[in-house]
Amino acid sequence: MRGSIIIYVLWMITLLSGLVFFTLYQIRYSYTRSSHFVDNWTFLYEARALAVTAVNLALKDPSILRLNSPLPYYISNRKYRVYVSAEEAKISLPLINADILKNLLLNLGMSENKAKEISENVMSFLGRGTSYQEGPSPHGDISSITELFYVKGMDRETYKELQKYLTPVATLTNINYAPEPVLLALGLTDSEVKSVKEQIKMSGYINPEWFQNLLGPSRSYIALRFLYVPNPMYYHVKVVKYEPFYDEMDFIVTSYGEVLDAWQN
């Protein structure tokens, strides 16, 4: 009889311990989930504000756009790195054609057949091609760069590369900030790209007349593909939070503070 009582008491203790453990686990899970939700909401709010702040700084000092190092920000216990660059340095998807896109892909090291396939699929996706595109085709001009994922044959590696050089914004390319693959894709030769880079280092910007003389009369039409202003109208901002939890978000922001596109990686 005494042994049965002991077994019963041990069983009750085990049961109560299990209930207590389960209750504490549920409380911890709810608290963690709630904290994560609040932290993510806070990040979205602060990232947007930091993106606009970074653009305002770049408007006052355009040299920030050529920095490889980030701008540090600290809000309470949260630590951020903010990278700002000229979105106008990219090639506009609303203005691009298949030849320019193919040249860009070739300059990025893609094979001839693959570059032709992707460029044709992108044009078809934008409603400017002739081949059949599975999915929402003709799609028209895209509003977010992430929509390139819908293009037939697009993989993550190709998307990551194109994201660096293509923009959904309808704008000419700002020659003062354009990287070499963009300049080559838009029709410049290797020697012309080198001259442009040297001129920017020497003068800080490209003069349209100087550029016309560089191209010569037979290729002067290429100059119409570029902007020459020192202060871009559109900016790309990457906001990275690295403490206490890692997160990052990209923005396309206008010079007057309007966010045109935003996506989390």
Image: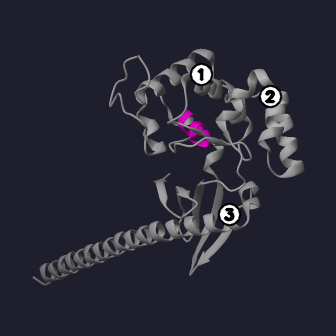
What is the three-letter code of the residue carrying label 2? Leu
Disc 2 secondary structure class: helix
Which residue does the numbered mark 2 point to in the structure image? Answer: 215
For residue 152, the mark is none
The color scheme shown is one colour
Task: Give the residue drawn at x 77%, y 41%.
Answer: 208
Which residue does the numbered mark 1 point to in the structure image? Answer: 99
Which residue does the numbered mark 3 point to in the structure image? Answer: 58
Task: Give the residue drawn at x 80%, y 39%.
Answer: 209
The disc, 2 or 3, on the residue closer to the chain's N-terminal end is 3
70 lies left or right of 79: right
Whether tag 2 and tag 1 are in contact, CB under 8 A, the answer is: no
- Start-end of magenta stretch: 158-166
Q: Is residue 37 magenta?
A: no
In the rendered image of this protein, does residue 179 appear above or below residue 155? below
Disc 1 secondary structure class: helix
